[in-house]
Amino acid sequence: MYDAYDPLKRDKTNVIAFFYDNDVNYVVMLWAIWMLGAVALPLNHAYPTEDLEYFLTDSMASLLLTTQNHKEKAVSFSHLGPTPVVYQSITSNENLAFERYDDLDFAIGEQWFLQKPALMIYTSGTTGKPKGVLLSHTNLHINILGMIDAWRWIGDDRIVHSLPLNHVHGVVNALLTPLYCGATVYMLPKFDAKVVFERFLERNEDYITLFMGVPTMYSLMIKYYDETYGSASEDTKEAIKEQLQKMRLFVSGSAALPVPVLNKWREISGHTLLERYGMTEIGMALTNPYKGQRVPGAVGLPFKYVNFMIGVYNAYVKGEYEVIVEGNQTEVTVTEGKEGQEGELLIKGLNVFSGYWNAPHKTTESFTSTGWFKTGDMAVYENGVVKMKGRLSVDIIKYGGYKISALEIEDVLQQNPDIQECCVIGVSDITWGQKVVAIVALKPNGNTLTQETLQEWARERLPKHKVPSVFKFVDQIPRNNMGKINKKDITKQYFGPKRK
């Protein structure tokens, strides 16, 4: 790879893309790219061809690093510019060899290097074409230190890794952080509820100590548990809970955690899932406490080194916000008379990204004039913790003068015992501006539910204006590979213009 790569230039951002599998080869490729002083762009080879073409073209990657498994696919993209380089895969411990390099051409600890972009991650593109987010070595380092501090990572920890490795959750939270502190990472090719859950139950010295997943993963493991152990004896269930209690932490993120999932997981394992909040652009920002009360639906307080603000855009002062609440890990100040008010969440700190790739205008638009990053998420500070109220665009429904939180309605609907999962969206309406619509997937025993019976059930639990006017029943709600629901895509899929 070194022979195919231009010598390191301090004043130039060089991008090297790579196709990966979830194994040790990913780690080797990532570190090799960084040792060259380049920016690593991990790409999921299973993505549609048009998506990969866009990422490779937009990023202007100079090389496309891959293994023999994906050689053909890599070569097929060579016409776009990047030179394909095939890396000899590590397939067993026999292939592993280690050398110590004390005299590299550059020192990783040098200040210029720490400020260099290290990782490019493309956003999911909920507001247009995906944007390349540039994270510097300092951004990664601060995020890692914050998670070690908040979640008490130690070298003796052991984690099962089954997250996609082209997102911050999989790369930074579940891989770089444990490796930084010397912990052990057991990497799986992909998430499998049975494989992961049964690994939790293994009674040996290298039992798993923590797990990080998206809410969908916990839902699927709950489903596996119910199907496999639901009719087991109470002694068996208690033995399972006892084994899971040996694990010290379960973290949920990347999407809102339904309260019924949290409650069911607590019933099975005795653990209260730790919810946190982050974004590609800022890494991890807020977390519930490792020790102490974890409030369902809340995301706690800032990580170390992170500052937060909840504010309302000031129409009279361009680019500025009126502060509702502002603070950090140790001190929070609420503006008098604004207690409990909702606003947009803004973040500042060394965890925040350096900019969007080749998009200076979009980068500028994403910050206030005083350096706060605008997350686009609504939040409220109540009872000493931050609660998320949804995206400014897709999770806030404007119905007849009301501003309605879609997440609040989802939380209520998830309490129906016949609903497997749901999402609430706003659909354009000539009379009301937007109407409240619920997309619902039922459990196998819930096929007797109808539009009328579900509306009647909802009216008993929600104000009239928050009751969905339409319930759309589907077999399964579409998600991306991180388990996220793209509400804009769903709105187009089910309620967009009909094609002739």
Image (cartoon, helix red, strand yellow):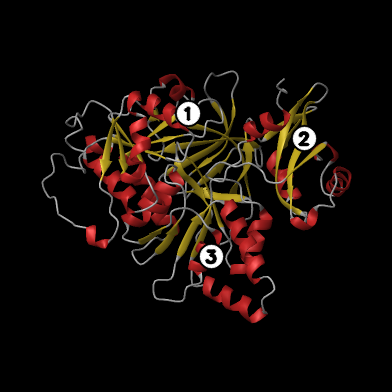
Q: Which is closer to the viewer, label 1 or label 3?
A: 1
- Could you tell me if the residues under marks 2 and 3 are in contact, i.e. CB atoms within 8 Å? no
Q: CA distance from mark 2 to mark 3?
A: 37 Å
The quadrant of the picture occupied by the N terminus is top left
Residue at the spot x=63%, y=30% of the render? 393
| Res. 27 in view | yes
Residue at the spot x=47%, y=27% of the render? 367
Instruction: Say above or below: 287 vs 41.
Output: below
Of all residues shown, which one is farthest toward the left?
103
Residue 491 is situated, as x and y percent measured from the top left of the image, at 68, 31
Q: CA distance from mark 1 to mark 2?
A: 33 Å
Q: CA distance from mark 1 to mark 3?
A: 35 Å
| Res. 291 in view | no
Question: What amino acid is labelled 3 in the image?
Answer: Phe
Question: What amino acid is labelled 2 in the image?
Answer: Val
Q: Which residue is mark 1?
A: 50
For mark 1, does the 10 Å Cα neighbourhood hold few (<14), some (14 to 19), or many (20 or more) residues? few
Q: Which residue is mark 2?
A: 436
Q: Which residue is mark 3?
A: 197
The mark that comes first in sequence, 1 or 3, is: 1
Of all residues shown, which one is farthest toward the front?
72
